[in-house]
Image: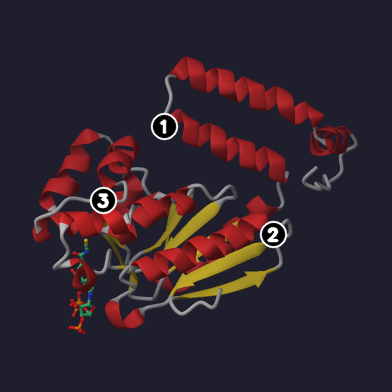
């Protein structure tokens, strides 16, 4: 697939996807989302890649869904396009996905960041769901992921009020892992990705799956699934290597097997 709206690079075990529609502040058109999903699928299938950084521009991560594209649509057209349903491929990415956010992450742009596993924010970052100002509500997970991340009251403030939160406030609320000077956001995210890419890949995959499951299942089911994954990992060579390396006081060499 030839990409027009995203840039895709790789640096050893770290993949980097940059949203690249600067003229419309990285508005998330269906074409962009399809390219992003395809790029992530490629990294998912690539055994050499251990983690991926997703970033946007220096002033805007992404300004949400493409308002020009949506303005005159009927509900049936919206249903047939199922624009936000297609985002499931992004949430289904099995490796660590780290958002490096500078500037505005609004609407779908914010929901995209919330689909990532970690968020590194530049000090200029702003996170918000302004859909209410357009007479709609978030449609790519905002009303569900905000309360699961920061609780009901902040979620209400953000979705009913429409005003964005600063990077610092998002950090205090636990939405953001680190706030850094904007000029080093991508570099820091790459370092974090490189560190995660050194871990045992099967364990990383199952850990991500288990944490995500916690947001979807009752505790007893989540605990049972966690235990099954925990026991399963004793079938991997990486578990043997990890424990042997610890006992031999050396660095483990994980192979993803
Ligand atoms: N969809 C389509 N086009 C968009 C867009 C979006 N979500 N967000 C910005 N743009 C376009 C603007 O229309 C403008 O186009 P123009 O140059 O042809 O006039 C261009 O991007 C620059 O935006 P502008 O508003 O002039 O930049 P700004 O720096 O003053 O403000 C934002 C930046 C992000 C605060 C502002 O653009 C904004 O609020 N965007 C909409 C965010 C939103 O509501 N998202 C939810 C969508 S469901």
Q: 194 or 227: which is nearer to us?
A: 227
Residue ID at (33%, 42%): 145
Location of mark 2 (residue): 46
> Are circles 2 and 3 on residues that touch, CB within 8 Å?
no
Whether residue 185 sits left or right of residue 13 in the image: it is left
Percent x, y of residue 247: 87, 32
Please identify, in this view, whether the residue under mark 1 or under mark 2 is nearer the observer.
Answer: 2
> Which is nearer the N-term, disc 3 or disc 1?
3
Location of mark 1 (residue): 215
Q: Does the residue labelled 3 lie within 8 Å of ligand 1?
A: yes
Disc 3 residue crowd, few under 14, some 14–19, many 20+, Cα 10 Å: some
> Are circles 3 and 1 on residues that touch, CB within 8 Å?
no
Whether residue 223 sits left or right of residue 5 in the image: it is right
Q: Can residue 165 be spotted in the picture?
A: no
Residue most toward the top? 220
Which quadrant does the C terminus fall into?
Answer: top right
């Amino acid at each position: 697939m030839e990409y027009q709206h995203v840039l895709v690079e790789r640096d050893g075990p770290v993949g980097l996807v940059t949203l690249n529609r600067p003229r419309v502040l990285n508005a998330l058109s269906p074409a962009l989302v399809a390219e992003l999903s395809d790029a992530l699928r490629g990294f998912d299938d690539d055994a050499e890649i251990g983690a991926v950084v997703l970033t946007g521009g220096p002033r805007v991560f992404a300004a949400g869904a493409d308002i020009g594209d949506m303005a005159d649509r009927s509900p049936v057209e919206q249903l047939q396009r199922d624009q936000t349903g297609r985002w499931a491929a992004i949430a289904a990415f099995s490796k660590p996905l780290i958002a490096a956010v500078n500037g505005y992450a609004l609407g779908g742009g914010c929901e995209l960041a919330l689909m990532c596993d970690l968020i590194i924010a530049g000090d200029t970052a702003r996170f918000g769901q302004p859909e209410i100002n357009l007479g709609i509500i978030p449609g790519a997970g905002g009303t569900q992921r905000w309360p699961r991340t920061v609780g009901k009251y902040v979620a209400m403030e953000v979705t009913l009020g429409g005003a964005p939160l600063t990077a610092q406030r998002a950090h205090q609320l636990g939405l953001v892992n680190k706030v850094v000077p904007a000029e080093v956001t991508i570099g820091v995210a790459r370092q974090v990705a490189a560190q995660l890419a050194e871990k045992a890949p099967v364990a990383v995959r199952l850990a991500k799956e288990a944490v995500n499951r916690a947001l979807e299942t009752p505790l007893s089911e989540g605990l049972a699934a966690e235990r099954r994954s925990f026991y399963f990992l004793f079938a991997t060579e990486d578990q043997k290597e990890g424990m042997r390396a610890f006992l031999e006081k050396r660095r483990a060499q994980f192979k993803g097997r």
